[in-house]
Structure formats: structure tokens, C-alpha cells
Amino acid sequence: MQKKLIALAVTGLLSTGAFAQSSAVTVYGVADLSFDVVKSSGFPGGALNVGSYTRVSSNGSYIGFKGTEDLGNGLKALFQLETGLNVDGNQGGNSLFGDGTTRDSFVGLNGGFGEVKLGTLTTPTRALGTAMDVNAGSTGIGDNKALLNRAGFDTRQGNAVQYTTPSMAGFSAAAAYVSGEDKRANALSPRNSSAWDLGLNYNNGPILLGLAYVTGQEKNTWDDKLRNLRVAGAYDFGVASIRLVWDQVKEKDNAGYDFKQSVWGIGGTYNVVPNGKLIAQFYKAADEKYNGVKAADSGAKLFEIGYEHSLSKRTMLKVVYARLNNEDNANFNFATNPVRKPGNNWSVPGIDPSGLQIGIRHSF
């Protein structure tokens, strides 16, 4: 009842002639808060290590508004507006909306032909990586984006348009185009970037298989080209599940720069009790390669183990321990709420972030 009243209030505030004729707006979201004990260690001499400290973290909390309109003949208009929430009051001030993140927000059409959306989108590469992560909501200090997001496509893409086919015998495909709105003609620093993100999935019963491929280009003096290939699969046994992923990023330009790095990972869950499960995952980033030559000690490993206990369909308790082991020349950090020295927004090569989270996640 409360959700319906909120939806009616939002509809009334935003009402126009068109809005008055549309279906009800659904208000939804997640409040995901945890008490963390985090640190980083491993720097020779300890000068740049971050000593153990506590914090309250908002792990991808958000609020959203969505709705559809039946246009007849099986065609529907749809929209969604989502924004991240600064529930812990510490990221960028005390404003609830200080998080500043725009989540999946779009308008589109859905019908027998499939679905078309325009806006800020989760494109196929991010969707596949999220499906392989063992954490509820694919968030928290141990989420796999810490090592998978080297190409930047494990974040949502703005200025994007995406087409998704209908599912046929478990198979579906998606193609997203990220437009080059950042074009500039500055002779010293020209910019005109764009990318395609393509995906093919098989999702049938306990089996999920996926392939995603990004091809991007920066049309400038150096003609940068980016490629990101991802292959992944998961199987749900009922009492347990397993996920596997392999990812490779390549980047080159006409000035002779040639970069490559691969990541693989394995994760799983095990139902200890009907409403509680163990989660664990391990990811490894191989050493970087430049022009075919391996850069020594530039890889990293991510370890995570935890327990999630559902109190109801909408409320869950969790405890998670995660650690990133960076080799001497690597500076990976947690993707959600990284560990950094106060006042610094960078990570020091060779330092190993780690942390324990105890939290609650509530969906509404």
C-alpha cells in the first residue's frame, strides 16, 4: 500500500497530459549498508600503507522509477530512471543524492521484435560480468569489477542505444552502440570516441553461457583501438552453483603502443540452510604485456569469502571478507568503496587492500 501511495504521489508531481494517460509508476530501490574494517598493507617499509580503520559504506544503494505504456498490438513504451544514493552520508557530503551516479536510465520500446533502449545502459559486457559475480547485487568490496573493469565496460555506458532480440529456445543477442558525444577538434588533443558492445547468451534452466565483445575506437592523432573479449558460464545445481569467466583486453595505436592483459575467475555458492548461503570467488589478472613483452609483477589476485542470510524476500544480512593481492607493479583496488589513504584518490603499486564487511541489504 505504501509503495502504491508513493507511486501515486510521484505521478501527481510529474503529471502532464501524457502522464495522466499512462500506467502507474513503480518506485523501487535498494538500501545496502555495511560496517567495514579495512586496511592496505604490503608497501616496503610501510610508509604508504593504510592502517586499519572503520567506516560505514553504501554499497550501490539506489532508488528508481519505472513504468510501461501499452500501445496496442503487442507494442509497449517503457522508461526507467535510476540514481545512486549516498545513504551513509560520507561520499561527497551529506546529501542523500551525493553519490552522483546515474544508473540504468532509459526510454524505449518493447514488442515481438525485441527491445530497443536509449540512455545510460548496462551493455552486454557489464551484464555478463555481473551475472558471474557471487555477491547479491554484484556489489561490495569483493565484487569482480575490481579486476574485470580494465576496459571500462563493467560500468554503465552513457549516450548509448541498445537492441536486444527476443529469447528463442534460450538464446538471445544484444548490440549496443556507445556514441562519440565527446568529440572535440582541438589540434593538440582531438577526440572522437565510439564503441560497439555485442553479446550472445544462452540461458536455459540451470545453464547460463555468454559471450561479449567490445570494439572501440578513438579517432585522434594516435587512432587508439580497444578490444575486450569475455567468455563466461554458470551452472546452478540447486544446492550449489559455479561460475567461470575469462576476459581479455587489448589496446593499440598507430604510434606503436600495443597492450594486452587477461583475467580469469571462478566463483560459487553453497546453500548451508534454506535461507542462507556461502559465497566465494577467486579472480586472477595475468601480467600485462606491452608490444608482446611481459611486464614483470603487474598482475593481481582477488579473494572473497562470505555468507548471505535472507530474513525475508526483501531483507538480507551479510558478512564478507575480501583481499586484493597486487604484485609489485600493479595497483588494483576494490571497485566498490576502494581503500585509499585519506585525501588521495589513487592506489599505490604493490599495496594490498583488504577488508571485512558486516551489513544489511533491503530491497523495496
Image (spheres, rainbow, N blue to C red):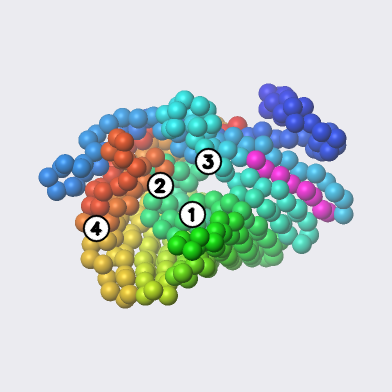
Q: Which residue is mark 1?
A: 154
Secondary structure of the residue carrying numbered label 1: loop
Q: Any magenta on residue 80?
A: yes
For numbered disc 4, what is the local secondary structure? loop
Q: Is there CB contact under 8 Å for labels 3 and 2?
A: no
The three-letter amino acid code for the residue at tag 4 is Asn
Give whichever of 222, 50 is nearer the camera.
Answer: 222
Disc number at residue 101? 3
Write down the residue under mark 4: 329
Type of the residue with mark 2? Ala
- Asked if residue 146 is among those painted magenta in the image, a careful observer would answer no
Which label sits on residue 208?
none
Closer to the eye: label 3 or 1: 3
Judged from the image, the secondary structure of the residue bearing numbered disc 2 is: loop
Q: Earlier in the sequence, mark 4 or mark 2?
A: 4
Whether residue 180 is situated above or below residue 221 in the rendered picture: above
Q: What residue is disc 2 on?
A: 335
Provide the secondary structure element on which disc 3 rests. Answer: loop
Q: Residue furthest front?
A: 187
Question: Can you see residue 232?
Answer: no
Question: Mark 1 is on which residue type?
Answer: Asp
Task: Give the dominant element type of the magenta stretch: helix, strand or loop.
Answer: strand
Q: Position of residue 95 (x, y in %)?
A: 51, 27
